[in-house]
Image (cartoon, rainbow, N blue to C red):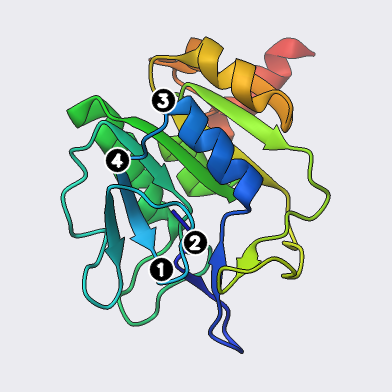
């Protein structure tokens, strides 16, 4: 699927570069079953595509075997949603429906959505080596590079296959060991006590 992302100034649809669409499709065995935030220029060609304004992907069913998500990176003022809502659905689709899910998102490791829906939940992360990932503009090459680093996040059972396919695009890290762990310090007070204990 493509981004479903809109720039504030020119209202262009930003799509996933073809090399990543090919890799995602290969990972899913040739078929992407759901693209929940598609657009009219999508090159993902999932079997089911939710596209605004007809279908709000956040409100539709995500009970599909394979899902690829390239969500809007900014806030949707009209609907009151953010990237956090898309990542919540990714995690829930994997946990509730056992869906295999890949999402292309900005690397923002200190944000609440990374802490809540990726760490301790996802299987792996591929930190993409593209200096400035160039999204498609309205389905065509030549778009400006993203101003931030990007990563592919994977929720699912096939880490080795994810590694084998995505290692050529960047550093692939297995984070399954974080599942069920309490990650991070609960509050400043506890952190202060731990810091004193380490001195």
Name the residue that disc number 2 marks: 3
**Circle 3 SS class:** loop
Name the residue that disc number 4 marks: 33
Which numbered disc flags the more N-terminal residue, 1 or 4? 4
Left or right of 77? Residue 43 is right
Q: CA distance from mark 3 to mark 4?
A: 11 Å
Asked whether disc 4 touches disc 2, contact meaning CB atoms under 8 Å apart, the reply is no
Relative image position of residue 103 (x, y in whole percent): 48, 43
Q: CA distance from mark 3 to mark 1?
A: 23 Å
Which numbered disc flags the more N-terminal residue, 2 or 1? 2
**Circle 1 SS class:** loop
Asked whether disc 2 touches disc 1, contact meaning CB atoms under 8 Å apart, the reply is yes
Along the line of sight, the residue nearer the viewer: 115 or 40: 40
Which numbered disc flags the more N-terminal residue, 3 or 2? 2
Mark 3, Cα crowd under 10 Å, few <14 / some 14-19 / many 20+, is few
- Give the position of the C terminus as an image quadrant: top right
Residue 29: assigned label: 3
Mark 2, Cα crowd under 10 Å, few <14 / some 14-19 / many 20+, is many
Relative image position of residue 169 (x, y in whole percent): 72, 33
Which of the two marks, 3 or 1, is nearer to us in this view? 3
Which of the two marks, 4 or 2, is nearer to us in this view? 4
Mark 1, Cα crowd under 10 Å, few <14 / some 14-19 / many 20+, is many
Residue 39: assigned label: 1
């Amino acid at each position: 699927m493509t981004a479903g992302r809109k720039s504030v100034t020119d209202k262009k649809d930003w799509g996933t570069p073809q090399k990543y669409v090919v890799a995602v499709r290969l990972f899913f065995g040739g078929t992407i079953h759901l693209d929940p935030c598609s657009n009219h220029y999508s090159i993902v060609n999932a079997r089911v595509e939710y596209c605004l304004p007809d279908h709000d992907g956040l409100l539709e069913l995500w009970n599909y075997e394979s899902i690829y998500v390239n969500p809007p990176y900014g806030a949707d003022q009209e609907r009151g949603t953010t990237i956090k809502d898309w990542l919540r659905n990714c995690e829930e689709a994997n946990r509730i429906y056992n869906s295999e899910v890949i999402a292309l998102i900005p690397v923002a490791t200190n944000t609440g959505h990374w802490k809540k829906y990726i760490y301790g939940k996802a299987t792996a992360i591929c930190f993409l080596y593209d200096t400035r990932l160039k999204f498609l503009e309205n389905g065509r090459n030549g778009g400006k590079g993203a101003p931030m680093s990007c990563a592919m996040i994977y929720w699912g059972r096939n880490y080795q296959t994810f590694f084998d396919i995505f290692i050529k695009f960047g550093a692939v890290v297995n984070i399954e060991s974080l599942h069920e762990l309490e990650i991070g310090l609960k509050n400043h007070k506890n952190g202060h006590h731990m810091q004193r204990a380490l001195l």
